[in-house]
């Protein structure tokens, strides 16, 4: 079993990018856990281009399965006065598995400052019991979880607005890629509607960082995953992440293929 920080440290420079071996505990079915896929892309970008300003946004398309040895290549798409765009492609043994575009932006003076995502008060994670994890995939055990509100998976519930407290088990997972990896941890918001387990596949994931992610300490984060729509085998969901202090630091959106 390899912890997140050790896996990132094992990433090595290759002729055409960076390579890493995906251990079994980070697999999600026949492919790599999506949050780790995104984190590997970001880690490669930060190593190849260390002079970038803070990360502001990430767009990831999960194109195909990846496991075993994976390779990440990066390309600067544009360097502007304040914003830079960098692309990353992750390849598995079967070819292209994921494509990511990261937007990095320097802070600028602005007359506008607003917060429109309300924070809901919930019991602190220390007051809640850890859920039973029997049968959970290995990657899920790399995160501490406290269920807060919303329907439980595979119960046939129509309450698809789920809140969780989450953090890495790995105490050394303090990097920006670690935060990105955490953001994909909540199960699909539609899972409460499932009467039993059936496979799903995330197709696209957009994440906006509402604060400089490098300034966040390792601590519990409150995450909301809310289903908006499901039809014809696809689901759309919104995702938000807050600190204990109530600051919204990430806002995301996913398109998910469902097979039920």
Image: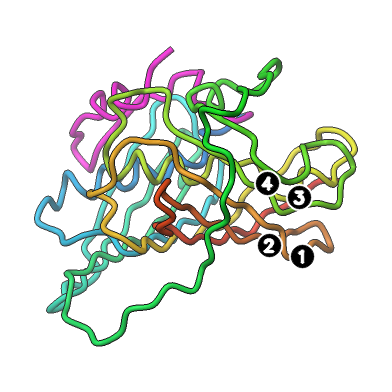
CA separation in Å, label 1 and label 4:
12 Å
Q: For the point 70% across and 15% down, which residue is it?
A: 134
Give the residue pinned by disc 3: 190
CA separation in Å, label 2 and label 3:
9 Å
| Color style of the picture | rainbow
Q: Which contiguous range is marked in magenta? A: 1-29
CA separation in Å, label 4 and label 2:
10 Å
Q: Is residue 2 left or right of residue 44?
A: right
Give the residue pinned by disc 4: 188
Mark 4, secondary structure of its residue = loop
Q: Residue 52 location, x and y as percent?
A: 15, 59
CA separation in Å, label 3 and label 4:
5 Å
| Callout 1 touching callout 2 (CB < 8 Å) | yes
Q: For the point 32% across and 42% down, which residue is it?
A: 177
Mark 2, secondary structure of its residue = strand
Q: Identify the mark at residue 236; answer none if there is no mark.
A: 2
| Callout 3 touching callout 4 (CB < 8 Å) | yes
CA separation in Å, label 1 and label 2:
5 Å
Q: Residue 202 location, x and y as percent?
A: 62, 49
Q: For the point 59% across and 58% down, which residue is it?
A: 254
Q: Residue 184 location, x and y as percent?
A: 52, 44
Q: In the image, is residue 113 part of the stretch drawn in magenta?
A: no
Vertical position of residue 113 compared to residue 207: above or below:
below
């Amino acid at each position: 079993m390899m912890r997140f920080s050790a896996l990132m440290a094992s990433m090595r420079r290759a002729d055409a990018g960076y390579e890493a071996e995906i251990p079994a505990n980070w697999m999600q079915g026949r492919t790599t856990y999506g949050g780790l896929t995104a984190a590997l892309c970001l880690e490669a970008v930060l190593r190849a281009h260390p002079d970038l300003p803070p990360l502001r946004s990430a767009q990831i398309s999960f194109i195909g399965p990846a496991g075993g040895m994976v390779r990440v290549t990066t390309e600067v798409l544009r360097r502007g006065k304040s914003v830079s765009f960098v692309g990353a492609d992750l390849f598995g043994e079967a070819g292209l598995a994921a494509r990511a575009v990261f937007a990095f932006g320097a802070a600028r003076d602005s007359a506008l400052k607003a917060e429109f995502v309300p924070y809901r008060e919930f019991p602190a994670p220390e007051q809640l019991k850890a859920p039973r994890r029997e049968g959970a995939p290995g990657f899920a055990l790399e995160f501490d979880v406290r269920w807060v509100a919303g329907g439980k998976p595979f119960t046939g519930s129509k309450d698809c607005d789920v809140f969780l407290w989450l953090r890495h088990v790995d105490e050394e997972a303090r990097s920006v890629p670690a935060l990105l990896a955490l953001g994909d941890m909540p199960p699909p918001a539609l899972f409460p509607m499932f009467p039993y387990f059936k496979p799903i596949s995330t197709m696209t994931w957009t994440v906006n960082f509402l604060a400089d992610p490098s300034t966040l300490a390792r601590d519990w984060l409150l995450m909301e995953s809310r289903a908006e729509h499901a039809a014809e085998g696809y689901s759309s969901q919104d995702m938000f992440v807050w600190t204990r202090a109530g600051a919204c630091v990430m806002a995301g959106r996913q398109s998910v293929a469902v097979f039920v």
